[in-house]
Image: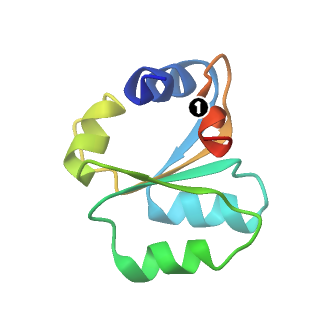
């Protein structure tokens, strides 16, 4: 699976929340199917997500700059939540 391509497809055809605040809101509302955090995302934020049993957290190997570029955005993205994958296969990360 090409993660960047799957992420772009999810952004285009599904519903993805970008940023720590909207990611946290999606998790609290029980809408986040998968959460992606950049390698340099603040540790306290990541550990608070990992404490929740019903949330799958995937750590992106790049920085927040690279995750932003993978999303096609001209800004930093340290965390995102996939609410609806659309035509993307990004949820297959949960089975890997």
- Indicate the quadrant where residue 40 lies: bottom left
Q: In x, y percent, where is residue 67? A: 31, 43
Query: x, y percentage for residue 6?
Result: 50, 24
How far from the left and from the top, in percent, is residue 13?
61, 18
In the rendered view, tell whether residue 73 sits above or below residue 39. above
Kindly identify which residue carries mark 1. Answer: 90
- Identify the residue at the far front of this view: 96
How many neighbours does mark 1 have within 10 angstroms: few (below 14), some (14-19), or many (20 or more)? many
User: Is residue 58 positioned above or below 13 on the image?
Assistant: below
- Count the numbered circles shown: 1
Q: Position of residue 43 (x, y in %)?
A: 37, 78
Which is nearer the eye, 39 or 96?
96
Name the image quarter holding the C terminus: top right
What residue is rendered at 25% in x and 48% in y?
62
Q: Secondary structure at mark 1?
A: helix
Task: Give the residue drawn at x 64%, y 64%.
Answer: 25
In the image, 3 versus 30, the foreground residue is 3
Q: Which picture quadrant has residue 26?
A: bottom right
């Amino acid at each position: 699976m090409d993660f960047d391509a799957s992420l772009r497809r999810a952004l285009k055809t599904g519903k993805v929340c970008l940023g720590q605040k909207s990611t946290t809101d999606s998790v609290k509302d029980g809408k986040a199917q998968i959460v992606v955090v950049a390698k340099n995302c603040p540790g306290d934020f990541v550990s608070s997500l990992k404490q929740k049993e019903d949330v799958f957290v995937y750590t992106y190997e790049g920085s927040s700059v690279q995750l932003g570029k993978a999303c096609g955005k001209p800004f930093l993205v340290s965390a995102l939540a996939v609410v609806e994958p659309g035509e993307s296969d990004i949820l297959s990360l949960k089975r890997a």
